[in-house]
Image (tube, grey):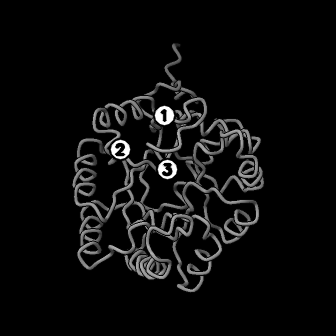
Amino acid sequence: MVDCSFSFPDDLGPGCAMGYNRSMSYVDLHAHLDDQAFNADRHEIIEEFFERGWQALISVADSYQEDSLALTSALLVRHPRLAVIVGAHPHGASNYSHSVEKAMLDFAARERPLACGEIGLDFHYNFSPPQQQRQVFARQLALARELGLPVVIHARNSEGEVLACLEQEKFPNPVVFHCFSGGLKEAREIAARGYGLSFSGIVTFAKATALREALAAMPKENVFTETDAPYLAPVPWRGRRNTPLMVDKVAEAVASCLKLSVSELNLQMAANLKRFFPGWKG
């Protein structure tokens, strides 16, 4: 008798376009695909990302820029596996208005983003006065709560105050600190609250010893990888334009810090995506 039984192999190879091979399926939690740095080849980059069988690419739509919202909507039509978040960055808090908020809410109703972001506080550059940043941050936390969305946080020299704001607002939904660049103390305080931390190409930089030490102390259940493209290209491309196709180098560095294989890290992030982003359909 001929044995006609069949089961899918565990590993279909890193180039599997169907995406079955989760262990080689990278996550880029945060990329600015609306940036003009991608005007010449953004579609090709997105297509190659998914042709490689990688599992998650999340782009950021800027509530302050009508062009960003329109472009992101068009990208979602052309690339159905692309996911998105939308929010008003703290740098532009001085320009926050009813029209900005309406544009964000209209986009959210139409495109169903995974989260509100990136939002938060930036006391390094202070492009907007701190008090305005606080007001806009609190307002967006309220909107995210009403919409039932997680938030993706931008925090620079402000992690403690961001945590205090989240506590004051009694924010109930998942929280991820994107492009985390703080130290061990801040990382532990974030993880202790059950929040996520996303790490970028900075972890590959030679002088980022303190960041790698902080990452090494984090529970794997709270960790993500990202590129923040077109910024912060990882070694060996530091100083060049970053793209989501470089996230594998970030994952290698993160996995090393956590003493995991890249396969183990990617499988863990598949679970983390579902836990932190209930709207994730991957």
Q: Earlier in the sequence, mark 3 or mark 2?
A: 3
Q: Residues within 10 Å of mark 3 (few under 14, many from 20)?
A: many
Q: In this image, 111 relative to 250: left or right?
A: left
Q: For the residues carrying marks 2 and 1, which lies nearer the camera in this image?
A: 1
Task: Read off the residue under disc 2.
Answer: 81
Q: Residue at x 39, y 49 (%)?
A: 32
Q: Position of residue 272 (x, y in %)?
A: 58, 54
Q: Residue at x 28, y 48 (%)?
A: 76
Measured Cα–Cα span from mark 2 to mark 1: 27 Å
Disc 3 is placed on an element classified as: strand
Disc 1 is placed on an element classified as: loop
Measured Cα–Cα span from mark 3 to mark 1: 20 Å
> Answer yes or no: do the residues labelled 2 and 1 have beta carbons within 8 Å?
no
- In the image as oriented, which residue stretches furthest toward the bottom? 168
In the figure, residue 19 lies in which quadrant? top left
Q: For the residues carrying marks 3 and 1, which lies nearer the camera in this image?
A: 1
Q: Position of residue 38 (x, y in %)?
A: 33, 39
- In the image as oriented, which residue stretches furthest toward the top? 1
Disc 2 is placed on an element classified as: loop
Q: Nearer the viewer, residue 46 or 1?
A: 46
Q: Which mark is residue 240?
A: 1
Q: Earlier in the sequence, mark 2 or mark 1?
A: 2
The answer to whether residue 139 is above or below residue 223 is below
Task: Read off the residue under disc 3.
Answer: 29
Q: Position of residue 64 (x, y in %)?
A: 30, 65
Name the amino acid type tagged 1. Arg
Q: Residue at x 45, y 32 (%)?
A: 53
Name the amino acid type tagged 3. Leu
The answer to whether residue 167 is above or below residue 277 is below
Q: Position of residue 224 (x, y in %)?
A: 59, 51
